[in-house]
């Protein structure tokens, strides 16, 4: 009969009388006895316990009399009996029964029902006559063990199960009876296993020792799993030498069931991640983060491991207390089993429930640590910052804690730099670095700079630049200005910056930490600005450089060139600077420059550069503005730009001077003197005057554009920005943009070859000077020859010879023909020169019209206001298409004419 059918028959009798209930109980108990004798598999114990529990639940009044024993006493005796008959194995049958009993009776709260169930189960294990009398029919159950003597009496207890009682049927306590329950006298049985008339069993010491050595195999497996949490190998789990992960030990894996094996491997995964975190937290492994921020990161990892080790230690303590309880149970039969039932042992399934949260935390720690290995400084902080705000509250809190710890050294470095101007960076992880090889004269611009790779992602470049400038201002005041003053409210600012570490990576930079940074920057920058603008007159010196280095003081430039015009035509090797200094002073005293601040005039000087072969005074003479002290630190990087800009401006002055004195002045002065040769040179001088006017128009428009539209307009913008400046860097940045705009307006280092086209135009002007000088020399030679011939004729008439000889006439005719050929050659040379000039101007105009700057386009329109060049160059007449823009980098092909741009050949 199956267990299910047996339970069904017991359940169906719940509506009958007590006699039928007792019969069902009798039929249920022998079946449990079969399990105890080993006639059935121990795996079916849970089925019997479950059936018994359901039977008692359905028949709660099966025992109407007082129960002989309490629940704890019954459970103790059942487990002792089952363990005594065990043949060994991984887990004791008594423990299996106890676990199943606890699970089955968890929902039963009534103590009488629990006691009744325990006595019912104990009835099948022992021959208890008192219990059988309580069944109601007076008949004894079949003895569960045939090897036992019928003379052996059962131990009787009081209501609490304490104290010895005799074995008579009426339950009297008059002492020890000399007969058993059936009235037979006591006799000695040599097979009995007890002493003192069967009252106490003879202990089996070897069996008891074996029980204590193998109390619970399940605890051993659990303990192996717990030790694997901290990377410790055990009996069942070993580490793979390659991967570092845990695997089952081949020698002991056979003792585990498939479920236990899978659970152990799953739990051992936590130990692998523990080892990974431990590896990243150890600086000797070489996988750790670097620098002081890296050490802070590793320190936080060690704190995480310490907290984790504390949790694992608590698990080991639970296992230890459970084992101690079991040992106490074997040593003391009066153990309170109710208390032991409330402290249930750890199992692998319970560990699976526990390890979920530590596993997730260790996995993220491993991932973060792996991403941070071999990183330092702001780069390390940026990696950790990337794990924030990802939707996982646990990860967000973990990353926040790690980043807060990592940023502590960074915040201290920022505080030290902004409040004291010092850098404490032994590992090169601060995003501000100091260049030891740079001197104090370059302190402001080159001494300190940002390490872009070390700027954390949560610090903007604007904020990093403010941090850099704040410390730079403090160093500038201390080392250059010799002013050593602490920042106002330094202690309060330091307290805020050092103690509000988590604010540095706030999502919105509106925290008290950012406010302290802004305050420190504003105070320091304003202090430096007041010193430079006040005592050191920075704005006054900028005005002086505009006037003299950029030739903005027009009357001074004109008088100065007039004073040194004799030096300008000399070879560069024949010019000396001390000769020019007196001329400079005379020009300053003779112009409005005399009313300028003496501080400016004292910084102005004239220098002679090292000449190259063929250089003249125009090439080697230049003005220089010398700055000293803090001004040199601020303006020294801009001085090369001023020198570069002075060159094209000085060359335009050169061209203007040449056109006005050497070309136009000679043309106007020689026009009347050579009136006698007008028939021969009239057309040539006409074309020369037109070409000169064309060049003068170009030069004058260039000067107007550069001086007024470029320099003056940008200077007005610079003044406006200087008035609005709140920090010294605002002025320096505005000044830098001012110089950059002028460089573009003066076509310095232009990528579209505008500067090269201008060079051709200027070279054409210089060549025109030589051509014109040669032409006028030939004209005056011819004029003098003709005057000499007229003088000879007049003298011959006075002497009465009246005329010239044939030889003289032939010589004069020959000289006339030679002069006419020279005029023809001059016309052709002038035509070639004008053609070269026209191509250069055409290319310059094409570059201007192709520019995206509207000012340059308007300048090109003003140069060719009457479309004079446009009609002669097909490229200039094309619309501004993509093809036209592309052609802006190529010299345009001028329209070919059979007679050239000018038809200047004289008609003889």
Image: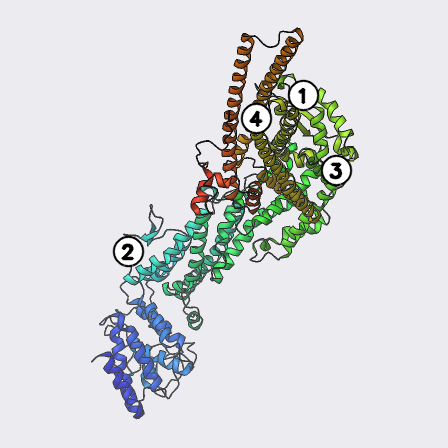
Q: Where is 664 relative to 275, above or below?
A: above
Residue wearing tag 2 = 253
Percent coordinates x, y for residue 643 in the rendering = 62, 31
Residue wearing tag 1 = 567
* Numbered marks: total: 4
Earlier in the chain: of badge 2 and badge 4, it is 2
Q: Residue at x 60, y 49 (%)?
A: 463
**Mark 1 nearby-residue class (10 Å; few <14, some 14–19, many ≥20):** many
Earlier in the chain: of badge 1 and badge 3, it is 3
**Foreground of the two, 587 or 786:** 786
Camera-near label (1 vs 4) is 4
Percent coordinates x, y for residue 56 in the rendering = 34, 83
Residue wearing tag 3 = 536
Q: Where is 615 relative to 252, above or below?
A: above
Quadrant showing the N terminus: bottom left
Which quadrant of the view contains residue 170? bottom left
């Amino acid at each position: 009969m199956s267990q299910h059918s047996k339970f069904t028959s017991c359940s169906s009798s719940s509506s009958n009388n007590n006699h039928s209930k007792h019969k069902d109980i009798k039929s249920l108990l022998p079946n449990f006895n079969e399990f105890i004798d080993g006639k059935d598999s121990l795996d079916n114990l849970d089925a019997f316990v479950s059936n018994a529990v359901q039977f008692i639940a359905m028949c709660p009044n099966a025992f109407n009399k007082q129960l002989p024993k309490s629940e704890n006493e019954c459970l103790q005796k059942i487990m002792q009996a089952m363990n005594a008959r065990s043949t060994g194995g991984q887990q004791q049958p008594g423990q299996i029964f106890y676990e199943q009993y606890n699970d089955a009776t968890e929902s039963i709260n009534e103590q009488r029902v629990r006691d009744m169930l325990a006595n019912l189960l104990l009835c099948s294990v022992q021959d208890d006559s008192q219990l059988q009398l309580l069944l109601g029919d007076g008949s004894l159950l079949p003895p569960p063990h045939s090897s036992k003597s019928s003379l052996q009496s059962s131990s009787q207890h009081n209501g609490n199960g304490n104290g010895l009682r005799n074995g008579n049927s009426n339950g009297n306590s008059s002492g020890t009876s000399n007969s058993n329950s059936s009235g037979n006298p006591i006799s000695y049985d040599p097979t009995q296993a007890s002493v003192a008339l069967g009252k106490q069993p003879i202990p089996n010491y070897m069996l008891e020792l074996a029980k204590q050595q193998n109390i619970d195999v399940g605890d051993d497996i659990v303990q192996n799993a717990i030790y694997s949490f901290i990377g410790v190998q055990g009996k069942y789990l070993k580490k793979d030498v390659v991967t570092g992960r845990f695997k089952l030990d081949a020698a002991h894996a056979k003792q585990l069931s498939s479920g236990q094996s899978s659970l152990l491997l799953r739990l051992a995964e936590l130990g692998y991640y523990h080892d990974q975190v431990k590896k990243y937290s150890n600086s000797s492994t070489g996988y750790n983060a670097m620098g002081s921020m890296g050490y802070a990161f590793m320190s936080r990892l060690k704190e995480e491991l310490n907290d984790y080790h504390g949790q694992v230690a608590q698990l080991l303590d639970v296992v230890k207390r459970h084992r101690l309880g079991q040992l106490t149970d074997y040593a003391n039969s009066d153990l309170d089993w109710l208390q032991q039932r409330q402290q249930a042992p750890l199992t692998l399934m319970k560990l699976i429930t526990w390890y979920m949260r530590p596993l997730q935390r260790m996995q993220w720690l491993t991932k973060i640590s792996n991403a941070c290995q071999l990183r330092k400084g702001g780069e390390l902080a940026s990696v950790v910052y990337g794990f924030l705000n990802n939707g996982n509250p646990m990860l967000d809190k973990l990353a926040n804690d790690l980043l807060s710890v990592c940023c502590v050294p960074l915040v201290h470095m920022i505080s030290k730099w902004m409040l004291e101007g010092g850098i404490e960076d032994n590992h090169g992880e601060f995003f501000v670095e100091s260049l030891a090889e740079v001197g104090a004269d370059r302190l402001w611009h080159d001494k300190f700079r940002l390490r872009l790779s070390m700027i954390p992602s949560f610090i903007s470049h604007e904020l990093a630049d403010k941090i850099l400038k704040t410390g730079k201002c403090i160093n500038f005041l201390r080392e250059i200005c010799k002013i050593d003053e602490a920042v106002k409210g330094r202690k309060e600012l330091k307290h805020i910056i050092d103690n509000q570490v988590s604010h540095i990576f706030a999502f919105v930079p509106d925290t008290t930490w950012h406010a302290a940074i802004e305050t420190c920057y504003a105070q320091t920058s304003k202090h430096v600005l007041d010193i430079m603008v006040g005592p050191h007159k920075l704005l006054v010196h900028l005005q002086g450089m505009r006037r003299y280095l950029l030739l903005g003081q027009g009357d001074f430039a004109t008088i100065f060139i007039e004073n040194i015009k004799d030096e300008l035509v000399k070879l560069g090797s024949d010019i000396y600077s001390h000769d020019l200094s007196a001329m400079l002073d005379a020009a300053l005293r003779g112009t409005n420059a005399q009313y300028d601040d003496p501080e400016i005039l004292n910084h102005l000087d004239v220098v002679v550069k090292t000449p190259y072969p063929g250089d003249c005074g125009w090439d080697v003479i230049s003005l220089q503005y010398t700055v000293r002290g803090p001004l040199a630190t601020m303006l020294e990087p801009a001085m090369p730009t001023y020198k570069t800009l002075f060159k094209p401006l000085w060359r335009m002055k050169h061209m203007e001077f040449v056109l006005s004195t050497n070309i136009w002045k000679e043309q106007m002065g020689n026009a009347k003197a050579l009136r006698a040769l007008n028939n021969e040179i009239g057309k040539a001088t006409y074309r020369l005057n037109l070409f000169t006017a064309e060049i003068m128009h170009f030069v004058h428009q260039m000067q107007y554009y550069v001086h007024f539209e470029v320099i003056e307009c940008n200077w007005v913008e610079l003044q406006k920005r200087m008035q609005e400046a709140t920090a010294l860097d605002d002025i320096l940045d505005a000044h830098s943009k001012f110089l950059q705009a002028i460089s573009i307006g003066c076509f310095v280092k232009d990528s579209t070859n505008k500067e090269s086209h201008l060079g051709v135009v200027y070279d054409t002007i210089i060549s025109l000077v030589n051509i014109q000088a040669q032409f006028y020399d030939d004209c005056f030679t011819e004029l003098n020859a003709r005057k000499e011939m007229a003088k000879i004729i007049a003298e011959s008439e006075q002497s009465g010879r009246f005329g010239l000889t044939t030889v003289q006439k032939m010589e004069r005719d020959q000289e006339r023909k030679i002069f006419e050929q020279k005029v023809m050659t001059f016309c052709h040379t002038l035509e070639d020169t004008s053609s070269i000039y026209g191509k250069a101007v055409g290319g310059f105009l094409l570059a201007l019209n192709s520019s995206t700057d509207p000012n340059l386009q308007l300048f090109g329109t003003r140069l060719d206001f009457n479309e004079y060049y446009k009609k002669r160059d097909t490229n200039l007449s094309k619309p501004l298409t993509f093809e036209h823009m592309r052609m802006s980098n190529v010299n345009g092909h001028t329209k070919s004419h059979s007679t050239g741009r000018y038809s200047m050949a004289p008609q003889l």
